[in-house]
Image (cartoon, rainbow, N blue to C red):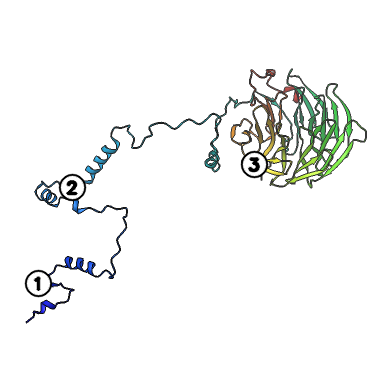
Amino acid sequence: MASYFDNVDSTFGASVDGKTMPRWQRKALDSNSNTGRLQTPKKEAVDRFIPNRASMDIEAAHYKLTHSENVPSPSKEHYAKAIESTLMGEANSKILAFKQKAPQPSEGHKNDLRVLYTQNRGAQRVRKASRAIPQNPERILDAPEMRPDFYLNILDWSSQNQIAVALNNSVYIWDAASGNTFELCHTEQAGDYISSVSWAGDGAHLAVGTSDSLVQIYDVTSQRKVRTMTGHSGRVAAMDWNGHILSTGSASGLIMNSDVRVANHCVSALEGHSQEVCGLKWSPDGKLLASGGNDNLVNIWSANGELRHTLTDHQAAVKALAWCPWQSNLLASGGGTADRHIRFWNTSSGNCVNSIDTQSQVCSLLWSAEHHEIISGHGFSKNQLSIWKYPSLAQVTELTDHTERVLGMAMSPDGQTVASIAADETIRFWKCFAADASNKKQKVMPTSSRLGAMIR
């Protein structure tokens, strides 16, 4: 009788000659006889380690594991020290190093990526001045009875090295070469005063504006008045020359261009300000006139009287105006207490190309062509003079000797000395733009330190 196990399902095994066939032999048999059965696909080689047991000596490995001494696993501290000593070795050793250094760039090579990593760099620290700038004035002159009025322009320095200053109702001339002082003129009517002074380019004629709306021209050499011009209805607080053309601005907002050579002097009348005109400056090439007013506006006029641009960024009266001596279309303007900004304008397009918040009322501006810098005179709150690099606008230094508001500034003919007049009734001279002695001969001012003649 046949045994049950002789006919058992091949799932559990097969019987050959009464013996059960192992599973692996049965699978091999099935793979040869049943070729139509689905086969497991062969796996492709992948990037991982698969041990080859056929090449391993299992018995030797087992002997070493069971008969060798037990070695404890190292601690984390011991492991870290071992790794550090292995990687670092000596103190100055490197993990990675090139056999040869990178080659030097060719001469004149410019790294274009420098802009990428520097364009968003924050504000630069104030750099120390590359030259010695005295922090104390070179001399101090008395200026008694001067009117502490922000809107007036009462100080100017001629090409012949003479300073004109208006002290209430009189104009005094101080010769910087000799130190001599004399009174040029004074107003006739009680209560009238001098509101502005401006030297002609020849350094021999001085324009004087008064509070009773007159404009007078004086020959300083002969100390006589050569003519009086009318046409304004308010005090004349701003004036500037362009050759034989004298531009004057008054409290009514009117600007007059006058040809001083002819009897009918008014060439053109410019109406672009609704309040007092307190700043007037012609460009060095004589093609453009800039005007600033108490209406917070800066107007740019052509020589024929055409209004080119009206600039409205300032938030306070604009008295301080200065044209850049090396860039003809660049104008600097300064705003009053509510604005405090120096703004730089491209007068060709009318765009503001740069600005800086000075934190103080801006009363006056002057450029230094020698050092490519601009100096500003200030009122509230520091009453200081500040020197700025252009175009970086990094502050070079501050001069803080004045005790009250700096109302005006003037530059010496050699461009090295700045005179500042302030409400503390003094004129102070600053040697802040000294030239290289090897390139220019420096003019030495007299040793007299007081303008005593001004009060007599």
Q: CA distance from mark 2 to mark 1?
A: 55 Å
SS label for mark 1: loop
Residue ID for mark 2 = 73
Task: Place residue 438 in its image quadrant.
Answer: top right
Crowding at dot 1, Cα within 10 Å, few <14 / some 14-19 / many 20+, comes out as: few
Q: Secondary structure at mark 2?
A: loop
Residue that lies at the very extreme toward the left in this rendered image: 1
* Residue that label 1 marks: 17
Looking at the rendered structure, the kind of residue marked 1 is Asp
> Could you say which quadrant of the image residue 18 lies in?
bottom left
Q: Is residue 111 at all visible to an observer of this figure?
A: yes
Residue lying at 28% horizontally and 67% vertically, measured from the top left: 39
Is residue 50 shown above or below 84? Answer: below
- On the image, the x and y values in percent for residue 125 come to 53, 36
Indicate the amino acid at tag 2: Ser
Q: Position of residue 90 (x, y in %)?
A: 29, 32
State the quadrant of the C terminus.
top right
Query: Disc 3 marks which amino acid?
Result: Ser
Q: List the single residue furthest toward the front.
A: 33
Q: Read off the residue under disc 3.
A: 355
On screen, residue 312 versus residue 242, left or right, reads left
